[in-house]
């Protein structure tokens, strides 16, 4: 399955937004069936997991950029 080539930060933001929408939906659903505390607990859990995944993706991108910069520097030094 081919996904559109979006920059990873945009994709990370989109998934964070989706987890936010899902958390709001779960709070709304549980509130309508009369269990608002369970809905808030589930919403916080979903939002926390989404935020953790967002930070993880940004960290991975940062590390990849760092490795690419180091590799480029080594190529320049070896090319002298």
Image (cartoon, rainbow, N blue to C red):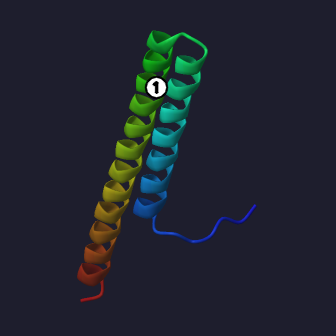
Relative to 36, does residue 20 appear above or below in the rendering? below
Q: Residues within 10 Å of mark 1 (few under 14, many from 20)?
A: many
In the rendered image, residue 26, in percent from the top left (x then y), is placed at 55, 27
Q: Quadrant of the C terminus?
A: bottom left
- Taking the image as shown, residue 75 lies to the left or right of residue 39, namely left
- Taking the image as shown, residue 18 lies to the left or right of residue 59, namely right
- Taking the image as shown, residue 30 lies to the left or right of residue 53, namely right
Taking the spot 66% from the left edge, 65% from the top edge, the residue there is 3
Relative to 32, does residue 19 appear above or below in the rendering? below
Taking the spot 27% from the left edge, 83% from the top edge, the residue there is 76
Residue at which label 1 appears: 43
Instruction: Out of 13 and 79, give the one closest to the viewer.
Output: 13
Instruction: Out of 5 and 18, give the one closest to the viewer.
Output: 18
- Taking the image as shown, residue 59 lies to the left or right of residue 18, namely left
Relative to 35, does residue 78 appear above or below in the rendering? below
SS for tag 1?
helix
Count the numbered circles shown: 1
Q: Quadrant of the N terminus?
A: bottom right
Relative to 40, does residue 50 appear above or below in the rendering? below
In the rendered image, residue 4, in percent from the top left (x then y), is placed at 62, 70
């Amino acid at each position: 399955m081919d996904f559109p080539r979006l920059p990873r930060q945009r994709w990370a933001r989109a998934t964070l937004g989706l987890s936010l929408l899902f958390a709001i939906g779960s709070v709304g659903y549980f509130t309508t069936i009369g269990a608002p505390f369970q809905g808030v607990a589930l919403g916080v859990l979903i939002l926390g997991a989404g935020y953790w995944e967002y930070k993880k993706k940004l960290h991975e991108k940062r590390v990849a950029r760092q490795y690419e910069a180091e590799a480029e520097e080594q190529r320049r030094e070896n090319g002298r």
